[in-house]
Image (cartoon, coloured by chain):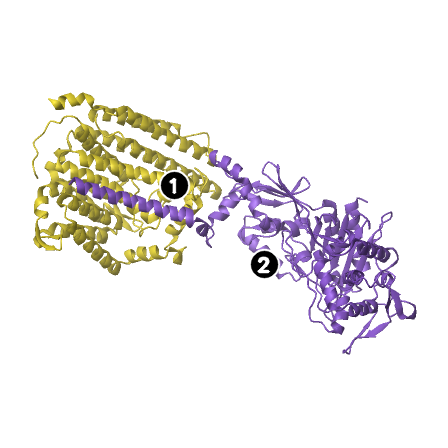
Chain colours: A purple, B yellow
Amino acid sequence: MIRQINRVTTVLILLVIALMLNVTFLQFFEAKKLRNQAGNQRMLLTEYSRQRGEILVNSDPIAYSQKTNDELQYLRTYKDGQTYASVTGFYSLVYGATGIELKENDILAGNDSRFFVDRLQQMLANRKPQGGAIRLSINDAAQKAAIKGLNGRTGAVVAIDPSTGAILALVSSPSFDPNLLSSHNSAAITAEYERLMADTAQPLLNRPLAMTLPPGSVFKLVTAAAALESGKYNAESLIDGPKEIQLPQSENVLGNWNDKACGTNNQTTLANALAISCNTAFANLGMELGADAIAEQAKKFGFETSFEVPLIAAASRFPSSLDQAQTAMSAIGQFDVRATALQMAMVTATIANDGVLMKPYLVEQVLGADLSVLEDASPAAISRAMKPENAKILRDMMVGVVANGTGSNAQISGVSVGGKTGTAENTPGQSAHAWFVGMAPSEGAKVAVAVVLQNGGGAREVSGNALAAPIAQSVMRAVLGR
Amino acid sequence: MAQSQRRYRVSTRRSAELVLLIAAWLIGVFAWILVDASTGAGAFAGWTTLLSSGVLLLIAHTVVRTQAPYADPILLPVAALLNMLGLAMIHRLDVAGEQRALANGSPKPTPDVYAQITWMALGLVLFMFTLTLLRDHRRLQRRTFIFGVVGIVLLFLPVLPVIGTEINGAKLWIQLGTLSFQPGEIAKITLAIFFAGYLVAHRHTLALVQNRIGNFALPRPKDVGPLVLIWILALLVLIGERDLGTSLLIFGLFIVLLYVATGRRAWVAIATLLLALGGGLAYLAFGHVRIRFDVWLDPFAEASGRGFQIVQSLYGLANGGIFGTGWGLGYPQLVPFAKTDFIASALGEELGLTGLIAIFILYAIIVERGARAAVATRDPFGNLLAIGLSTVIGLQAFIVIGGVTRLIPLTGLTTPFLSYGGSSLISNYILIAILVRISNAARAPEIEEPKVVNA
């Protein structure tokens, strides 16, 4: 009987080992899959039961978690939610997270591997993990100036520190209140979300990053840069700029906005063409340079690339396989050229930064739960888009635009401001998009800004100088503190 | 005599038992404190409860010291540790219930942990009674058939009208006034005694060989009767009470004892065939068996319907991961029946893979120590009874934990010593008392041989 008893014992122990192998499979190998299974509310409950980290502007928490009495133990709260919504995004029970809440979730939720030691201590102390904080590169004054300037009109503002790529303002308008989407009442969340989705002004669209529009005349900066970089042009080079031109192999006639020739003998310097935004001169210039040269230059400025700031920005596009007429139209930012406000701010920042394109970023610092610094932003150059001397020529030309050209509304007394207006034709029957890009001060710039009002933000008379330049001016003043 | 000289060399190991018991109690207390600290359940309100559990364990230890001084020193502490962990988890789930009631504004539910500690007290008292009254386990052998009859009656009590009660679709309970009781839990012990006693008497007959296939010895066809009877008994439990777990446990126990008693693997083969046949019939005939089986194959097909329990259990285990969320920091209350059938998944969530494996090892230790007593005891009845009782603990733990972790289809059984429930806790303490008694006989230097009467 002893032998049989030993055998039975072996079988029973094997059963226990089978249990062990099974739970090892479940809790180790399958755990991740099970945790992410649709319908598993534990991940959500776990996330909500932790104190999620703050999102800071300077030392001011603009998103933080407050203790509650309900089952979801912390409520995400946004201070000045409308102002920062395009950056923070929301943190919703029903719709998940967006913006920084989504992109920096590992930090905010405390899951990042950098919290390993913290987690170990918390585990030994039988405490719940706490999230780290994110400090944004946002300049509070610039962000507020931008949202105030847009004042609910459909549009976008992006401001960048040209020397680092730090995003100082990122505004989408009209905005939304992330508090209403981050509550613990799923019925109220759903109602608010449905309302926002039904709104034709698309408040949930992150315009500065996601909306690509024809850049119109602000794109002339790219064409001008291509001309300077070709080595065949300088600021004083003469270009044909008649009242209108017949586009090759086309019925279309392209004219200037004032129906006048851009200079005597139908000729203009490159600098003057930019200052008065001469369409015919830039169309001719584009056809001279060829589509490939412009496309190449656009690419060096960041076109065709989707940037993660860490929010994902749509790639801006310069069309390919163009005929001469299309090249002419594309050279002035029409036809199928599409750019985000972020992209046009990057073009301007690159010109301001002596031709070096910096990687744009929103996260200045990653902090631990105790606000100790875990990581500082490390500014990185993406490419050299222009020679420094050409960048300098183009900056001086842009100063001319603001000082005595189409961009007069961006002037700041005592500061040399460079800029470029744009009024982009769109679908016939709809108002044009009003653009302005600018930099201040023009040498050693502290800020480069792009403003766009979609369909003129509702205005009937659309002009970049009238609508967009004043907003750009107030944002630049906010950064400069003037 | 050599034997009387040896008496003084055998160490009783009682101090080891005491140290282990204190350690088991402290682990339980520590778990309880962690639950209170992390849930904010208040300034450690359960200290009287915990103190009384400690006193009870000390008294139990004293009784072992006087009544069974040579007993295995591991069995009681391991059972106590499982019991203490169960108490802490039931308390933790009580706290979750209170917090939910608070959030919903509904009345505060009655905590279950105080009832459980009362059952623990009763269980330990019966442990001491059993140990004191049962001076020699062989006395059980004289009443083999009485135990058999009692076991069968107990098994079928819940089917009777008036006292039988159906809870959650299974008729496992009897209701006596306000007290509900699960007689199947006691039946597993009396049936183990009955099987052991019967097989000791008939093992030589049952081991007889008539035919061989190769070197595989087949028993005589006319000896198949008892096995078929037990098979029918198990099927009746399944049909009458819809209790797949108890049915499986009783049949499994009989197979094991039949094999140990006769040494014939053919019995295992025949029994396995009968088990497959019974399982097949049950699958075809009964909706509830079919549902259990289908849900086992694909619980996610109806994750919010029939698969809800097991899916929630798997989510809990996954949430626990390797090290667990920590006491009071997971969501074990999301799993239905977390205090009873699904307590293993609750522990798996908060203590993780490491904690669960530790608990499995505790069951393995009970099985191993029981088997050791079975091997070492000097009489065949003791051999059979000890391995039978070890099998009951091991098999029951496997059936229920395997069920809630989706290793095998889910069947309702309590998790020995962990689950909330009086019948289960009391029976398991009695079971451990008998094992302790047999282990004492195995290790004691000298036993007065009473006359053994074959039943």
**x, y percent for residue B7:** 17, 22
Q: Quadrant of residue B438?
A: top left
Quarter of the image that includes the N terminus of chain B: top left
- The label on residue B183 is none
Residue at 27 percent across and 25 percent down: it is B59
Residue at 42 percent across and 46 percent down: it is A28
- The label on residue B347 is 1
> The residue under label 2 is which amino acid type?
Glu
Q: Residue furthest right?
A: A264
Front in this rendered view, residue A421 or A18: A18
Q: Which circle, 2 or 1, is nearer the viewer?
A: 1
Front in this rendered view, residue A137 or A204: A137
**x, y percent for residue A372:** 61, 36
> The residue under label 1 is which amino acid type?
Leu
Inspect this view and state whether residue A72 appears. Answer: no
Q: Circle 2 — which element? A: helix
Q: Is residue A397 left or right of residue B269?
A: right
**x, y percent for residue B260:** 16, 43
Pointers 2 and 1 in contact (CB under 8 A)? no
Q: Chain of mark 1?
A: B
Kindly identify which residue carries mark 2: A194
**x, y percent for residue B61:** 27, 26
